[in-house]
Amino acid sequence: MPTVRSSAMRTVYIRERSFHSPVSLARTLGIGLDDADRYIALLCAHGVLRLRTGDEPKEYDPLGESAPRGTYQFVYVGLALVESVCIVVYPKYLPEIDPKRPDDATCAAMSQVFRVLRKSGGSYASIAAATEEGMGANDRLALMLSLLEMYDEYGVYSNYVRTIADNGSGNISWERTIAANLPFVRDGRPIYFDYKTVETDADASDFVTRLHRAVLTECSRFMQESGLAQLLALDEVWLSDSSVADFGDADFVAYRLERERAVQFVTWKQDVIDLLVRYVRDEGMSATSDAPLCLGTSSFHHVWETACKVAFGDVLAVRLGELGIELAPPFAGMAEKRLIDVIPRPEWAALGAGEERACGEVATLIPDIVTVRGAGGRAAAGGGTFAILDAKYYTPLLGERVGGVPGVESVTKQFLYQAAYRDFVLAHGFSRVVNAFLVPSCGDAVEHLGRVRFPGVIAAEEPPFSNEVELYALPAEAVFDAYVGGRELDAARLAEVVG
């Protein structure tokens, strides 16, 4: 059966995109150099660390940092438990802190990050399972989180015992009452002074119920002792003083569980039994006892993009008839089309036999976020704003040296998106087009960092179109709060970007 790790767990906070040599990592984690080499191999295998070759794009690096070739960089946000060390990798937009003494702001930010990851992944268990190797090496953490999350939703596994009682509090069984009791007849109507009732009680002594309680308690104890409970905002679960080992060896316990599974037809209870069987059999877990338990993602930029879509009310997939504006020609008959469908597609043609033949449709431009705003409400033509936004998980540096900014391809695409919506903007009388990049910050206010132009390549535009792509730093805490709550940013912050 799985064993709970030692309670002597040390937590170390490391900034995403920071780079390390074996020596510096050993010093940061408080381990020996041999252990550091082993940790590096394990973390690289699970996508937490990546070897720098010197060919990576500079736009992703933290402010002012340049990773020497041959070092290892944390390309991950989340946590990784390696033996007695819990490595918490916090997002790169947060300021660097003492690895062993994190401040309250960073701890609070990480708690929010895990809530965001849970929402984007559907559950903590699914995030834990999403390692580069699938469920295998990370099976234990995913399994424990699955059990705790199912308990949070459904409670403890229980079987119910139905009994017949005399004059009980349950529903009256008239069939049994009539068969067992003589009535008193009054005015031709039978009256029963005693009646039989059906009582339904949870069978607290049921084997699976008691085992489930013990397993949940053991999983919760692991979360508490490892520090994961605080990070993941998991409540303590204390349901049993029994050890899982008290129920017998793995084969006997699995046999009892499989017998129960054969007569159980409630889906969630079947799922719980399946999880318990895996837990007691330790399937695929013993051989990987030294593998890190990971909960996080190496694609946090996707999380930022998704959060910005929600926070800014992206309408790319909204039908034109639902935008809240009166459609004008040539879009008047396109109410069922989506805003993404308005963008033209490249037209390829094949040549042969002296003639040109049109080919089928190909992929086209797809902006990150499009939102329409106006004084008359969420969307309004005539005086409204048409905003084309691109969420970038970058840490920009603008000054004598430019770094951590979107590349030429990203800048060019923003102007192409504007051109793609030209007819729609003009037809509906929008008075302003906003073209902007959105990056995260640890501040509490929207900050207008700068803008980029591309003269000589991108032709100058007349109002309402823009000749610049603006760069805004958004308070990540506010954006993620909006995302977790399934709502848009507050009106004041939205107005600073899209008017």
Image (tube, grey):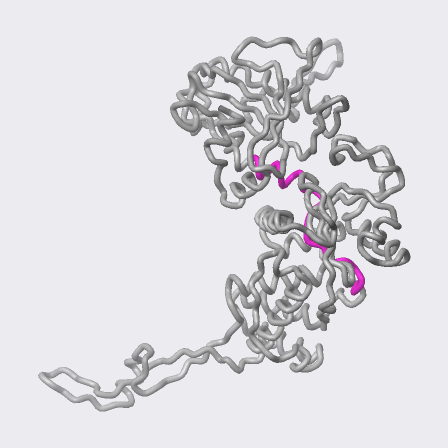
Q: Position of residue 3 (x, y in %)?
A: 72, 71
Residue at x 79%, y 31% (from the top left corner): 57
Residue at x 49%, y 27% (from the top left corner): 495
Position of the N terminus by quadrant: bottom right
| Highlighted magenta segment, given as a residue range | 288-308
5 to 24, vertically: above or below: below
| Occupied quadrant, residue 182 | bottom left
- Count how many numbered circles sit on residues in the image: 0
**Magenta segment: does it hold 296?**
yes
Horizontally, residue 4 falls left or right of residue 149, namely right
The one nearer the camera, 49 or 158, is 49
**Magenta segment: does it hold 364?**
no
In the image, farthest residue toward the left? 187
Q: Is residue 380 visible?
A: yes
Q: Position of residue 404 (x, y in %)?
A: 73, 30
8 to 402, vertically: above or below: below
393 to 42, vertically: above or below: above
The one nearer the camera, 41 or 280, is 41
Q: Is residue 134 visible?
A: no
Q: Position of residue 198 (x, y in %)?
A: 35, 80
Q: Position of residue 46 (x, y in %)?
A: 78, 51
Residue at x 63%, y 26% (from the top left corner): 449
| Occupied quadrant, residue 66 | top right
